[in-house]
Image (tube, helix red, strand yellow):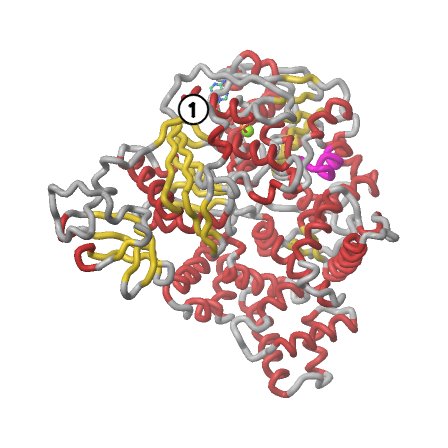
């Protein structure tokens, strides 16, 4: 048997790991050392050399995208499909189990997944019903409380009741009421997926036994970011018969705030039998300058397992540091450098812009738009989270399940059809009083004459609309269903009426949704009975809706494009050219981390993740002043910059760059001899008779033709002819 293709391209250590005898194994190794690669090759090894059946393999990755990539790579190594293999995120796999065993898990067959936004709305509603003052009791905190306990495997009934802590007691009440509402409506939030499938293992030994006999090899990538319930789930499934491969890097644990436990790496050796530990130390991703910077930075953390990481790649270029006058200047710089990368023959795909907070992306996007550089936001405002897309999905949901209350509430009056908040409240009350869905409540309310004539007519029309749509699309393909929902419901007309860019964007997104439906190849989920025989099949529509809810901002449509994403979503990825934007105290490390112990180290690990995404060239950029969340702030450069050895860094200076230096104002038109630099500079505050105060962003051209772009605080960014603008400088 020729296994060259599996072992070629691995170093000795990696080969040792891939070919290790069957058993539990832990790989703890730094970024870019080939952990994911080793995991993929191990799967191929199991199948080809150990004769494992692909159906006996379960691999857990961090994102759906990573799962798709992993499956692809395994199939290439095996030169054939490995469909029976389960690869997915913890959430995806738990969801699949619950779809198969809905009845055993105590769920209705058509249970719905609540995404984060739905969950927040529902909690808000619960809190309103409990008469809690929103000012005093922010719903987000309650959501956090609920998810935190679910992640630790605790339901409301497991929590102490007689606590003196009013915070605890109140949130517990919300948790209880929320659980009840979810149970009534057949709603399952993300944390619930895992909690419930863990309970399924514990309560149904027959089902557990079935899966334990099936899955002989469990492999987990990014193990450092598993939380308690995921870890417990894995442990139960593994039992004593499966071997577990856990691959991770303690220095890249960045989800502590969401309940992930680095300690799981340490527990692993205790909780699983005869764990072999493998360390990989050679980095294959980055230049030695980038690696040196990453190593020095992370060395400032006290809590580490400690490891060496080296590379035989050359020094490469220094890391470039750019200090922008403000966030717009920073964004413009990033776009410029991306453009020159592309002009020199690079691809937009090679480029990633990483930031700490999603709010930073807007100005960077605008800079890319201005230069016509294609870009994509990854994991930001998820495509499926946009209001217009959610509206369309709600219609699709209602077509498939009339009693989906979340969807009902969302679109009963969108587009507006004269059903006011009072009427909706009335429907909700009827539903609550009778323990029925809002759909049924609406029907009953009409039959019993509980609404005013006008309201009754409007509701009746809505119910008929949904029933008619459902009838019309009965035998239609998924994308035709989507199209029907979007058109017949009036959503397309409604959203495209919005003025300007917004309206265009909304229309495009709705069209994109139809495309997404057309491209959707449902991974068929066959609901199985515990003994394994088929018990019916989820419709393609339902599968698509689940997928939309589980999507973590990964859906994107074609074409090469630069990627923009938060540092958190960059985990596991690599790019030749990386920008880390907003390297400022307060933003990164984030201000909120100052108050909580341990959080600064987590921020530093996040910086380590960012730096180690870069293969060839890395930029750190920051802005001296920044407008974020509506207020202007002056920030110091991030302490992380100081933690990187000075000889790894080189500052980018704009001096001598004609496009950025221009003549003074007070000397009037062009004067070649004028060397006075005391006039308007980029980043300077100026005032204009009509537009008021602003900041100079950039300048182009010479003499009479000099144009400046000024960002006015009220009027926005404007280009002006310098000679006529009559700008006054402020503060000189
Ligand atoms: P991270 O911690 O960021 O997830 P990782 O440890 O999972 O990183 P990989 O993504 O598996 O690292 O590998 C990093 C890069 O190095 C990839 O491009 C991979 O193909 C390459 N690589 C890994 N091992 C080798 C090797 N032996 N020879 C050549 N290239 C390798
Ligand atoms: Mg990896």
Q: Which residue is labeled 1 in the image?
A: 646
Where's residue 312, x and y in %? 44, 14
Residue 532 appears in which quarter of the rendering? top right
Extreme-front residue of the structure: 732
What residue is rendered at 60% in x and 35% in y?
Answer: 600
Front in this rendered view, residue 582 or 96? 582
Q: Main secondary structure of the magenta part?
A: helix
| Side of 160 where 317 appears, left or right | left
What residue is rendered at 63% in x and 88% in y?
Answer: 453
Image quadrant of ligand 2?
top right
Q: Is residue 603 above or below residue 171?
A: above
User: Which element carries disc 1, helix, strand or loop?
Assistant: helix
Where's residue 310, x and y in %? 50, 16
Residue 689 lies in the magenta stretch: no
Q: Specify the segment rendered in magenta.
A: 226-234
Residue 232 lies in the magenta stretch: yes
| Side of 274 where 491 appears, left or right | left
Q: Is residue 78 visible?
A: no
Residue 222 appears in which quarter of the rendering? top right
Q: Is residue 195 visible?
A: yes
Quadrant holding the N terminus = top right
Front in this rendered view, residue 189 or 218? 189
Extreme-top residue of the structure: 12
Query: How many residues crowd mark 1 within 10 Å: few (<14), some (14–19), many (20+)?
Result: few
| Side of 642 where 349 appears, left or right | left
């Amino acid at each position: 048997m020729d296994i060259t293709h599996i072992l070629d391209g691995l170093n000795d250590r990696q080969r040792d790991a891939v070919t290790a005898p069957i058993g539990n194994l832990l790989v703890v190794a730094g970024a870019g050392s080939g952990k994911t690669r080793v995991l993929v090759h191990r799967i191929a090894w199991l199948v080809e050399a150990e004769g494992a059946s692909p159906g006996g393999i379960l691999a857990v990755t961090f994102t759906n995208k990573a799962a798709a990539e992993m499956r692809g790579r395994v199939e290439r190594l095996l030169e054939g499909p490995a469909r029976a293999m389960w690869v997915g995120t913890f959430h995806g796999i738990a969801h699949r189990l619950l779809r198969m065993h809905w009845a055993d898990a105590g769920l209705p067959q058509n249970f719905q997944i609540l995404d984060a936004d739905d969950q927040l709305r529902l909690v808000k509603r619960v809190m309103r019903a409990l008469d809690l003052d929103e000012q005093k009791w922010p719903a987000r905190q309650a959501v956090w409380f609920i998810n935190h306990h679910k992640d630790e495997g605790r339901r409301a009934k497991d929590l102490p009741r007689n606590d003196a802590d009013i915070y605890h007691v109140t949130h517990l009440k919300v948790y209880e009421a929320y659980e009840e509402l979810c149970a009534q409506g057949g709603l399952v939030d993300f944390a619930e997926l895992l909690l419930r499938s863990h309970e399924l293992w514990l309560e149904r030994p027959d089902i557990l036994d079935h899966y334990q006999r099936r899955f002989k090899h469990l492999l987990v990538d990014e193990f450092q970011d598993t939380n308690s319930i995921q870890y417990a789930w894995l442990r139960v499934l593994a039992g004593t018969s499966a071997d577990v491969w856990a691959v991770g890097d303690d220095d890249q644990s960045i989800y502590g705030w969401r309940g992930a436990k680095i300690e799981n790496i340490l527990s692993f050796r205790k909780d699983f039998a005869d764990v072999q530990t493998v360390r990989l130390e050679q980095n294959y991703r980055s230049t030695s300058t980038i690696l040196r910077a990453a190593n020095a930075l992370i060395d400032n953390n006290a809590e580490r397992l400690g490891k060496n990481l080296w590379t035989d790649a050359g020094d490469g270029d220094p890391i470039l540091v750019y200090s922008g006058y403000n966030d717009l200047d920073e964004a413009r710089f990033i776009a410029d450098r991306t453009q020159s990368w592309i002009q020199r023959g690079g691809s937009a795909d090679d480029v990633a812009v990483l930031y700490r907070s999603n709010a930073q992306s807007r100005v960077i996007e605008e800079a890319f738009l201005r230069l016509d550089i294609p870009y994509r936001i990854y994991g930001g405002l998820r495509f499926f989270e946009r209001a217009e897309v959610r509206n369309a999905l709600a219609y699709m949901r209602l077509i498939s399940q009339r009693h989906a209350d979340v969807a009902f509430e969302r679109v009963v009056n969108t587009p507006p059809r004269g059903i006011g908040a009072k009427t909706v409240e009335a429907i909700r009350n009827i539903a609550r009083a009778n323990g029925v869905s809002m759909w049924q409540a609406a029907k009953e309310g009409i039959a019993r004459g509980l609404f005013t004539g006008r309201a009754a007519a409007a509701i009746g029309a809505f119910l008929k609309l949904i029933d008619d749509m459902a009838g019309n699309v009965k035998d239609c393909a998924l994308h035709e269903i989507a199209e029907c929902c979007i058109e017949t419901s009036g959503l397309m007309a409604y959203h495209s009426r919005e003025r300007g860019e917004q309206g265009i964007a909304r229309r495009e997104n709705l069209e994109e949704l139809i495309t997404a439906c057309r491209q959707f190849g449902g991974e068929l989920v066959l609901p199985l009975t515990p003994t394994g025989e088929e018990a019916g099949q989820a419709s393609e529509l339902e599968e698509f809706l689940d997928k939309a809810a589980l999507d973590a901002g990964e859906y994107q449509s074609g074409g090469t494009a630069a990627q923009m994403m938060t540092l958190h979503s960059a985990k596991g990825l690599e790019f030749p050219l990386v920008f880390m934007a907003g390297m400022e105290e307060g933003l990164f490390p984030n201000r909120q981390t100052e108050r909580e112990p341990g959080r600064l180290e987590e921020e530093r690990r996040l910086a380590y993740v960012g730096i180690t995404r870069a293969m060839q060239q890395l930029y750190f950029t920051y802005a001296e002043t920044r407008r974020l969340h509506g207020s202007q702030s002056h920030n110091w450069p991030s302490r992380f910059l100081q933690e990187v050895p000075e000889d790894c860094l080189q500052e980018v200076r704009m001096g001598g760059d004609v496009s950025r230096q221009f003549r003074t104002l007070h000397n009037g038109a062009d004067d070649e001899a004028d060397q006075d630099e005391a006039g308007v500079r980029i980043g300077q505050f100026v005032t204009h008779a009509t537009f008021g105060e602003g900041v100079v962003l950039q300048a182009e051209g010479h003499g009479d033709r000099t144009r400046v772009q000024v960002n006015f605080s009220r009027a926005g960014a404007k280009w002006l002819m310098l000679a006529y603008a009559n700008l006054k400088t402020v503060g000189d």
